[in-house]
Amino acid sequence: MAEHKSVFIKIKRQDTPTSKPYWEEFELAHHPGMNVISCLMEIAANPVTRDGKATTPITWHTWTMRFTGVDLHTFPNYSFGKVQEELFHPALFAFYIVGLVAASWHFCYGIWLFAAKWGITSGEKARQRFLVVCLGLFVLMTGVGFASLYSFRSRPQQPSGTGIEATEANHAPGTHGKPVD
């Protein structure tokens, strides 16, 4: 008889910046090769908690970067300030650091694994040497990422363009954010 394995995921959610946080638990069927991203994709495809309660997919980044505040497609000057504002929150700053390191590692290890699996680096000695190269690339990419994060936090705070004041600042007075011919 086959044993049914599950993965349990607990996600801390908060509806608004001022509302009380709460936890949602999800149960996913285990399959080989699962990772955090695949689990989040499964939850997004079927956003139902372990208790059977329907919930919303995790959309915070899309919501904050695309739909709240000023439209960055119309006013790209505000993108620096918008990200900079997020990086001054300690929890979000830590989240960015973890994401940066994880993405850099995933990319560099993926290059190494590709070369090993496809026979580009045949032989143990070649794989070990290429691993050193990939680790160097990881350190370089992570360093560049940290330098970028440092530049966001070390510069004077830029306006993030939240709301109508940002729109009005880029248009003629009295046009209420509408372009003037």
Image (cartoon, grey):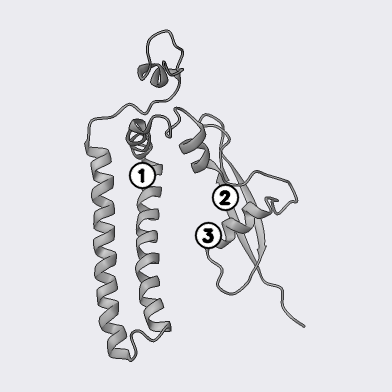
Indicate which disc, 2 or 1, sits on the residue closer to the N terminus: 2
Of the 4 image quadrants, the one containing the C terminus is top left
Answer left or right for 177 relative to 21: left
**CB under 8 Å between callouts 1 and 3?**
no
Residue at image point 25% right, 54% down: 144
Lower sequence index among marks 3 and 2: 2
Residue 176: % across, % down: 46, 13
Q: Which residue appears farthest toward the bottom when viewing the image? A: 123
Secondary structure type for disc 2 = strand
Residue 113, above or below 105: below
Determine whether 169 is above or below 155 in the image: above
**What separation in Å lies between label 1 and label 3 (alpha carbons)?**
20 Å
- For the N terminus, give its image quadrant: bottom right
Choose mark 3 or mark 2, whichever is in front. Answer: 3
Residue ID for mark 2: 11
* Vertical comparison of 27 with 122: above or below: above
Residue 36, labelled with which disc? none
Above-or-below relation of 92 to 166: below
**Nearest the eye: 99 or 65:** 65
Q: Which mark is residue 93?
A: 1
Measured from the top left, where is residue 39 in percent x and y? Answer: 58, 60
Amino acid at circle 3 = Ile
Disc number lying in front (1 or 3): 3
